[in-house]
Amino acid sequence: MARRPNNRLALITYLARDYDQAVDWFCRVLGFSLIEDTDQGGGKRWVRLGLGDAGGTQLLVAKAVGDQADFVGKHAGTRVGFFLYTNDFDSQYAKMVAMDVHFEESPRQESYGKVAVFQDLYGNRWDLIERA
């Protein structure tokens, strides 16, 4: 029997205007940790941010250059493109509101859990979700 590959989604590119601005916001506001920040020369850096265990999916912060700048804040067009799960929606929501995170709606209950759409520092849309 052939061995089945053990694949996983490791990194998602997150387009930013500025490395330090993005790192600060994700770490301060959403509780991400800076996992790696390696200078690659020429103004490029390899910047990885993550939540929880090191085996989870991470954001690879990429500074937009040239026409890439047109896509900052538009990762998924007008759709929600990122989903942040929490095990304590109410306290996470209150913390984010206190930090002036823009929520597009009040929290609502859905069949899959409690959810509210918010925008990150560049306007990308996220769901904050506590699973049912």
Image: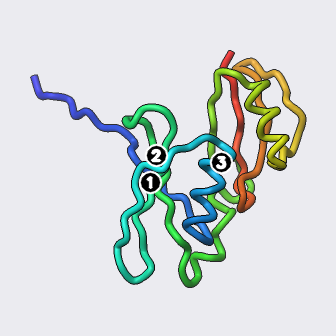
Q: Callout 3: helix, strand or loop?
A: helix
Q: Which residue ends up furthest to the top in the rendered image?
A: 132
Residue in the picture at 42% in, 32% down: 53
Q: Is residue 13 left or right of residue 5?
A: right
The crowd level at tag 1 (other Cα within 10 Å; few <14, some 14-19, many 20+) is many
Of residues 105 and 90, which is closer to you in this image? 90
Identify which amino acid the numbered label 2 is placed on.
Answer: Gln
Q: Are marks 1 and 2 in contact (CB under 8 Å)?
A: yes
The crowd level at tag 3 (other Cα within 10 Å; few <14, some 14-19, many 20+) is few
Comes first in the chain, label 1 or label 2: 1
- The mark found on residue 28 in the picture is 3
Q: Is residue 9 left or right of residue 33?
A: left
Residue in the picture at 86% in, 45% down: 104
Residue 71 at x, y percent in the picture: 64, 70
Q: Callout 1: helix, strand or loop?
A: strand
- The mark found on residue 48 in the picture is 1
The image quadrant where one finds the C terminus is top right
Q: Nearer the viewer, mark 1 or mark 2?
A: 1
Identify whether 69 is placed above or below 73: below
Q: Is residue 100 left or right of residue 18?
A: right
Of residues 51 and 74, which is closer to you in this image? 51
Comes first in the chain, label 1 or label 3: 3
Q: Nearer the viewer, mark 1 or mark 3?
A: 3
Residue in the picture at 78% in, 36% down: 95
Q: Disc 2 marks which residue? A: 58
Residue 40 at x, y percent in the picture: 35, 73
